[in-house]
Image (cartoon, rainbow, N blue to C red):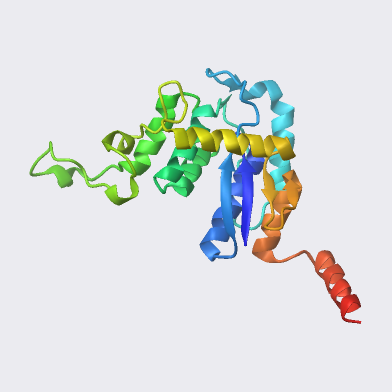
Amino acid sequence: MRYVVYGDFNCPYSYLASLRVDELVRRGAAEVEWRAVEHDPKLPLTGAPSGAAQDEWARELGEIADISRPGERVPDAPPALVSNTGSAVAAYAEALTDGMADEVRRAIFRAIWVEGRHVSSPYEIRRIVAELMYPRTPPDVHRYGPDLPMAIDTGRVALGTERRFGATVSVQGGPLTLAGQRRVEQWRAEWQSRTQVVPAVVSPDGELLPGLAGLARLAELLDGPPPAAADARGDRELARAA
């Protein structure tokens, strides 16, 4: 069974959804497809100070702290600058081509919510992708030839050498390929046609679960339904059997 999750890299609720998706995939409990969208594409490329909405951030972060499961480390403060995530979404769309979607998703969420980085710039996004595609190696790797290329996992990079240095988005911040552009446009159109809320979880049977309802479904997939829901489900099954 495949679930689809629409999420925004700036959204703390989407960050929690990403943690749960990773745990579901790790356990093999469900097949999940993440689709990145921008909740507010009009955010300035210079970043918007988070202090301007301090109360709203406090409410949202307090809410995800309240619903977090044991072991889920959720942020307790927003980044100083809220990024325009157009380049981040483009990079994630291109990462599907390279077979690195999960890694790029995790790295962007970590950059924003753990490291507090401002990622509006395409060059900052390229740096994040390059850290995954072209990982740093110990100095002794080049002991006998400093000009030799470093070892990377070339089997996972679909196109040329430039992509290995993180160049999966243009200098304007858009996807580099038509396939990437189509993904970005399709994801946004699908999301906007059904809801304006992130995260939004779509179940295998097409049920839309926006916001907290979607997070609750992901938790249920991990832990089972809450007792009240489980009792009600059992009552329905007994009624059908009778």
Residue at position x 59%, y 65% from top?
29
**Location of residue 168 (image quadrant):** top left
* Near-viewer residue (126 or 208): 208
Q: Is 224 located above or below residue 69 in the figure?
A: below
* Near-viewer residue (222 or 60): 222
Q: Quadrant of the N terminus?
A: bottom right
Q: In this rendering, would 49 be left or right of 206?
A: left
Residue at the left extreme, as displayed: 144
- Residue 154 appears anywhere in the view: yes
Q: Position of residue 192 (x, y in %)?
A: 69, 35
Residue at position x 49%, y 45% from top?
106
Q: Quadrant of the C terminus?
A: bottom right
Q: Position of residue 177 (x, y in %)?
A: 42, 33
Q: Position of residue 185 (x, y in %)?
A: 57, 33
- Residue 117 appears anywhere in the view: no
* Near-viewer residue (148 or 90): 90
Residue at position x 62%, y 41% from top?
7
Q: In this rendering, would 189 be left or right of 128?
A: right
Q: In this rendering, would 64 be left or right of 234?
A: left
**In the rendered picture of this protein, how many numbered marks are placed on residues?**
0
Residue at the bottom extreme, as displayed: 242
Q: Is 87 located above or below residue 198 in the figure?
A: above
Q: Position of residue 45 (x, y in %)?
A: 53, 19
**Location of residue 127 (image quadrant):** top left
